Image (cartoon, helix red, strand yellow):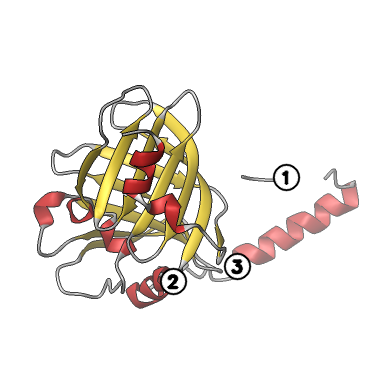
């Protein structure tokens, strides 16, 4: 989200001199965030809300709003015309399809790499959890997997620095398909109703 004078002739000369001086200065490479700092940031999130854009494996794009209540709870509300809703809570993930009267598809949350950031205590320094840790331009990226279930896929988390901020992730599932989620401005520390993450409540509300 970039932003950008019309200098006078004298200003141009000064600007040129300043630029020449700056090129003589050593450029300090930005350091990537440490795994300990990233773990501390994730553990500091109790509740959060943010708009999101999702790029799906089939090339389609969705938008909506994300709610997090750690540990273990997350909710993706999709904007129209999308009619899907994804709720994580009680150790399960449920996918509701507003176009269908069938029961929500459910599976254990541990089958998705998202559980790595929803854990009661995130510790990315655990052996065999992090399989990639890089600085991609100005963002630190961390690729993590469940060391006990590496076949379930990976999650590549993206963070900005100063202050530390989670900006999104890329999930690669067990079949190799990628889904990218880009987060807008996140707000934290609000009160969120437990019913947002209650799968049974959502099913009953829908008459299922």
Circle on res. 41? 2
Q: Position of residue 51 (x, y in %)?
A: 53, 45
Q: Secondary structure at mark 1?
A: loop
Q: Residue at x 28, y 58 (%)?
A: 90
**Which residue does the numbered mark 1 point to in the structure image?**
4
Q: CA distance from mark 2 to mark 1?
A: 31 Å
How many numbered discs? 3
Residue that appears at 88% across and 47% down: 9
List x then y, in percent, for residue 156.
30, 53
What label sits on residue 150 in the rendered view?
none
Q: Residues within 10 Å of mark 3 (few under 14, many from 20)?
A: few
Image side of residue 166 versus residue 122, left or right: right
Name above or below for residue 5 compared with residue 55.
Answer: below
Pointer 2 or 1: first along the chain = 1
Residue 168 in view here:
no
Residue 182 x/y as whole percent: 45, 45
Which mark is on residue 24? 3
Left or right position of 140 against 112:
right
CA gap between label 2 and label 3 equals 36 Å
Question: Is residue 52 or residue 5 the one in the foreground?
Answer: 52
Whether tag 1 and tag 3 are in contact, CB under 8 A, the answer is no
Tags 2 and 3 in contact by the CB under 8 Å rule? no
Q: Is residue 174 left or right of residue 25?
A: left
Tell me the SS state at disc 3: loop
């Amino acid at each position: 989200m970039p932003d950008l004078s019309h200098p006078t002739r004298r200003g141009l000369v000064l600007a040129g001199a300043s630029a020449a001086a700056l090129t003589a200065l050593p450029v300090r490479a930005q350091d990537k965030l440490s795994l300990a700092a990233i773990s501390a940031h994730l553990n500091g999130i109790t509740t959060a809300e943010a708009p999101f854009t999702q790029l799906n494996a089939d090339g389609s794009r969705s938008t909506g709003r994300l709610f997090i209540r750690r540990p273990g709870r997350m909710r993706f509300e999709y904007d129209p015309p999308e009619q899907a809703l994804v709720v994580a809570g009680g150790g399960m993930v449920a996918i509701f399809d507003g176009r269908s009267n069938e029961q929500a598809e459910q599976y254990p949350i541990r089958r998705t790499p998202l559980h790595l950031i929803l854990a009661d205590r995130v510790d990315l320094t655990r052996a065999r959890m992090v399989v990639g840790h890089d600085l991609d331009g100005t963002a630190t990226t961390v690729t993590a997997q469940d060391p006990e279930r590496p076949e379930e896929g990976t999650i590549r988390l993206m963070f900005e620095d100063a202050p530390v901020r989670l900006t999104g992730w890329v999930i690669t599932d067990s079949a190799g398909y990628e889904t990218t989620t880009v987060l807008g401005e996140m707000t934290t520390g609000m009160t969120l109703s437990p019913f947002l993450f209650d799968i049974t409540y959502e099913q009953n509300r829908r008459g299922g």
